[in-house]
Image (tube, rainbow, N blue to C red):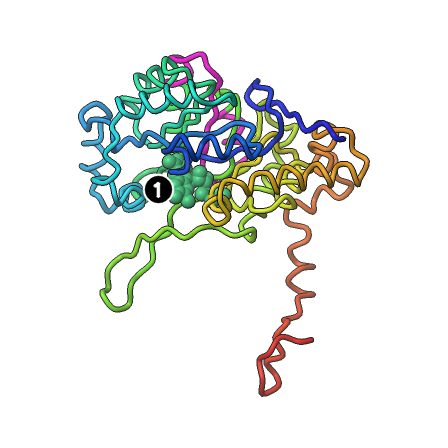
Amino acid sequence: MADLRTRYLGLELANPVVPSASTLSSRIDTLKRLQDAGAAAVVMQSLFEEQIEHEEIEIDRMLEAGTNSFPEAITYVPELEDYNIGPDAYVRHLEQTKEELEIPVIGSLNGASKGGWVRHAKLIRDAGADALELNIYYVAADPNLTSAEVEQRYIDLVAAVRSSVEIPLAVKVGPFFSSMANMARRLVEAGADGLVLFNRFLQPDIDLETLGVDPTLHLSTSEELRLPLRWIAILRGRVDASLAATTGVHTWEDAMKLILAGADATMMASALFKHGPEHVRTVVDGIRTWLDEHEYASVEQAKGSVSQAACPDPVAFERSNYMRAVVNYTSPYDWRAASSEPRA
Ligand SMILES: Cc1cc2nc3c(=O)[nH]c(=O)nc-3n(C[C@H](O)[C@H](O)[C@H](O)COP(=O)(O)O)c2cc1C
């Protein structure tokens, strides 16, 4: 049987399937179900910067810039009053999780400003976290802010946290950089041991009846996998860091594709909300079966074998296929006829 072990952030994981940060980690019994189903590690729900005292994290700077500059950062935690677990309760929950679980536990901080991160990173380390994931959730909506300034903000944040804690540090970012590959390299140079690609930004909608902004969170589908798939494939071997994929990982097929692209860990949230914690087992079993059937001895052997560096058609991960794909596209809908039923 194929060996599923993988190294992520210097930790040896039993397999590459890891529940990503979400409210699934807020209850110990759910965490135990995830572990029993084969989760190799767990990323805890984030401690959000909105939960950390305002003066401590320079949040006034955010507010001065006008809430319109940060609509998503604010609506991401719309039920903040209900989510009344502050930093102390967060740390206690983390300590208890470490006591109760055998798998590695990764603490998580989510925000965009500097200030309090260093202290809270230390608290998470002291609570026994095996690693820390820093989710930099920042919507750069201010037209006066240049890309260079935004990027520097990410780098400064990573460097500040890196210099304060020695536990492995993963950095979770969104895909919206002009030069993702360069940014990935700079994040690693600033001290990230791993990159988690990609943060899935909440996209607000407009309610046509109330004319209000609807921040409802929609779960992802496998359709969204291709973005992390491309970038994991491109970055494999190009940055000296672990790579984890998040967004759109729903099935064992999704996870297997990411491993072939070069992911060290494949993270899931939406699929676990849809199918429950036991879904982890289906994904782990599916990976093992595929490896056995395709005569791979291990995850390590398969890892990165279809990365851009290893692929016989490397430009396929860049622009080259675009024209071919659009020019050759044929709609499955026969709209020239009266009916718009999909073609048989
Ligand atoms: C209900 C819910 C809560 C989440 N909470 C967090 C969080 O606390 N911190 C974080 O970094 N990401 C959080 N996320 C984002 C997930 O970790 C994940 O990156 C994202 O949902 C994309 O993965 P998916 O397609 O498997 O859902 C949350 C997602 C969901 C659906």
Judging by the rendered image, the residue that carries numbered circle 1 is: 139
| Residue occupying the far right of the picture | 295
Quadrant containing ligand 1 reads top left
Residue 341 lies in quadrant: bottom right
Of 246 and 187, nearer the camera is 246
Observer able to see residue 148: no
Q: Amino acid type of disc 1?
A: Val
Q: Position of residue 188 (x, y in %)?
A: 51, 23
Q: Position of residue 70 (x, y in %)?
A: 28, 43
In the rendered image, the vertical position of residue 15 relative to residue 11, given as above or below: below
- Asked if residue 35 lies left or right of residue 30, the reply is right
Find out whether residue 168 is within the magenta segment.
Answer: yes
Find out whether residue 296 is within the magenta segment.
Answer: no
Which stretch appears magenta?
160-187
Residue 154 lies in quadrant: top left
Element on which disc 1 rests: loop
